[in-house]
């Protein structure tokens, strides 16, 4: 028998540490390769670690709640010495094609090349459903019967999107007067350098344990606080807002919900807002740009694509996953992407890749009953849009006061990148779509 020590792997995020959230095994338990041994939380996601060995659990080397560095020993296994396989990545760290892997597995703790194990290939159940193990686990977590899912993958395989769309329960909308996105996805223009703004050092208050409690700042909260401070004290924020008659948006949402084409898709006003932001960003590209400090000063990166971020309040804290190349999606595909993002975030399984590379963000504060706000820009972006609650209010229409569905659209922008006229034009465009979504129709 051989004792194998397993070290905390690099989960492919470029991070250096993680917290052991919960052990799923105990000393003496028998495990097989790919059995989940624990949950870890990084600054970006909650990940299930699969076992790299088949055998018996020896010792848990790290207690729950402790943060350790990548490469630190966390568990030992007693094996017969014959298994040298690497495990299949857990579902939160892998896409449906298995593109993201947990690097550094095996007793050596180093990154190694790996061939695809049989467990990673699609497997067919007794009723003929083809799906990979991570997809089957997702279906179990979402209480989805795979026999009822319409498969869209190669060779009839059920994909992650198939499961999410089934769980969450038209045409391409585009304004022909809107300029096309260029073939070049990014460009840079010179910009003047600015001096950083200093931060005051905080003072620790005296705490009475009977009257208060102390919460350690780590994981998602640590990453969020760092990002918000960086943004607030480096990018000069300016916020503008406009009250909007969203009655026709609400009517369109009602029609889409009743449409057979959207029967299996959850539709909300956020879908129209997302299309409005994409459309307006094409007309005012600088809101989709970013400030970049360089050795020679600074540049402004102008993106010719939209990775649309959606701020999501989850049990783990604030996450901002984004929909890649959202400008290429029609209304139905965008709705599906929003559904997938929402369900994945709610289940706490947003992957690190989904949170990287955003270009502009929407925060839907209306779900909390808020009318408006002054959101902080997500680092690496130049703009963020807040949609307030949609409520019936008295509104003057053709000289008469009538009840209408009214909301407030607000936007914060990096004033280094975009000036007041551009900010105002962008928010006015978003508001015009919310007032008359038919402007999107080609």
Image (spheres, rainbow, N blue to C red):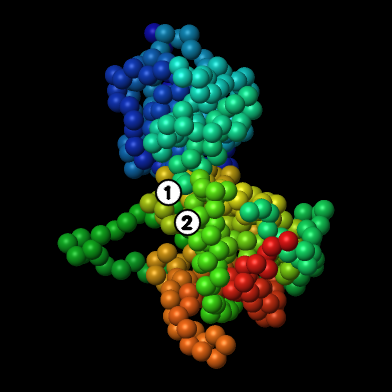
Q: How many numbered badges does the structure rendering display?
A: 2
Residue pictured at 39% horizontal, 55% vertical: 217
**What is the spatial separation of the Cα atoms under label 1 and label 2, in whole angstroms?**
8 Å
Image quadrant holding the C terminus, namely: bottom right
Q: How crowded is mark 2: few (under 14 residues within 10 Å), some or many (20 or more)?
A: some
Which label number is shown at residue 346?
Answer: 1
Left or right side of 218 for 226: right
Per the image, the residue denoted by label 2 is 312
Is residue 182 or residue 194 the one in the foreground?
A: 182
Res. 4 image quadrant: top left
- Contact (CB < 8 A) between labels 1 and 2? yes
Q: What element carries label 1?
A: helix
Residue pictured at 52% horizontal, 30% vertical: 89
Is residue 395 or residue 333 the one in the foreground?
A: 395
Is residue 234 or residue 102 the one in the foreground?
A: 102
7 shown above or below 394: above
């Amino acid at each position: 028998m051989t004792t194998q020590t397993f070290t905390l792997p690099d989960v492919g995020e470029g991070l250096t540490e993680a917290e052991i959230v919960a052990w799923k095994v105990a000393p003496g338990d028998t495990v097989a390769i790919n059995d989940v041994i624990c949950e870890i939380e990084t600054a970006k996601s909650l990940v299930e670690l699969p076992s790299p060995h088949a055998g018996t659990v020896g010792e848990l080397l790290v207690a729950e709640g402790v943060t350790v560095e990548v490469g630190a020993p966390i568990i030992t296994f007693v094996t017969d010495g014959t298994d040298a396989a690497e495990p299949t990545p857990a579902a939160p760290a892998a896409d449906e094609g298995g593109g993201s892997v947990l690097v550094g597995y095996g007793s050596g703790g180093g990154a190694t090349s790996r061939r695809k194990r049989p467990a990673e290939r699609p497997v067919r159940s007794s009723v003929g459903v083809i799906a990979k193990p991570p997809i089957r686990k997702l279906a179990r977590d979402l209480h989805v019967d795979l026999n009822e899912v319409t498969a869209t993958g190669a060779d009839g395989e059920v994909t992650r999107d198939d499961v999410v769309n089934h769980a969450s329960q038209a045409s391409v909308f585009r304004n022909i007067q809107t300029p096309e996105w260029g073939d070049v996805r990014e460009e840079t223009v010179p910009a003047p350098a600015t001096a950083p703004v200093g931060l005051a050092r905080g003072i620790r208050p005296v705490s009475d344990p009977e009257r208060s409690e102390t919460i350690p700042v780590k994981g998602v909260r640590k990453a969020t606080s760092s990002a918000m401070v960086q943004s607030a004290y480096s990018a000069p924020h300016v916020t503008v807002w406009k009250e909007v008659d969203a009655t026709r948006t609400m009517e369109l949402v009602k029609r889409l919900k009743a449409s057979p084409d959207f029967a299996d898709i959850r539709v909300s006003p956020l879908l129209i807002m997302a299309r409005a932001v994409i459309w307006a960003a094409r007309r005012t590209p600088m809101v989709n740009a970013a400030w970049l400090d360089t050795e020679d000063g600074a540049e402004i990166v102008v993106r010719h694509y939209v990775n649309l971020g959606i701020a999501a309040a989850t049990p783990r804290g604030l996450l901002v996953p984004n929909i890649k190349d959202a400008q290429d999606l029609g209304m139905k595909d965008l709705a599906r992407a929003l559904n997938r993002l929402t369900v994945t975030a709610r289940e706490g399984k947003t992957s690190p890749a989904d949170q990287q590379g955003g270009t502009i963000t929407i925060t839907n504060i209306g779900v909390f009953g808020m009318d408006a706000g002054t959101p902080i820009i997500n680092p690496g972006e130049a703009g963020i849009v807040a949609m307030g609650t949609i409520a019936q209010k008295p509104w003057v229409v053709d000289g008469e006061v009538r009840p209408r569905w009214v909301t407030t659209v607000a936007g914060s922008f990096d004033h280094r990148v975009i000036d007041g006229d551009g900010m105002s034009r962008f928010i006015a465009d978003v508001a015009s779509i919310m007032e008359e979504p038919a402007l999107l129709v080609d």
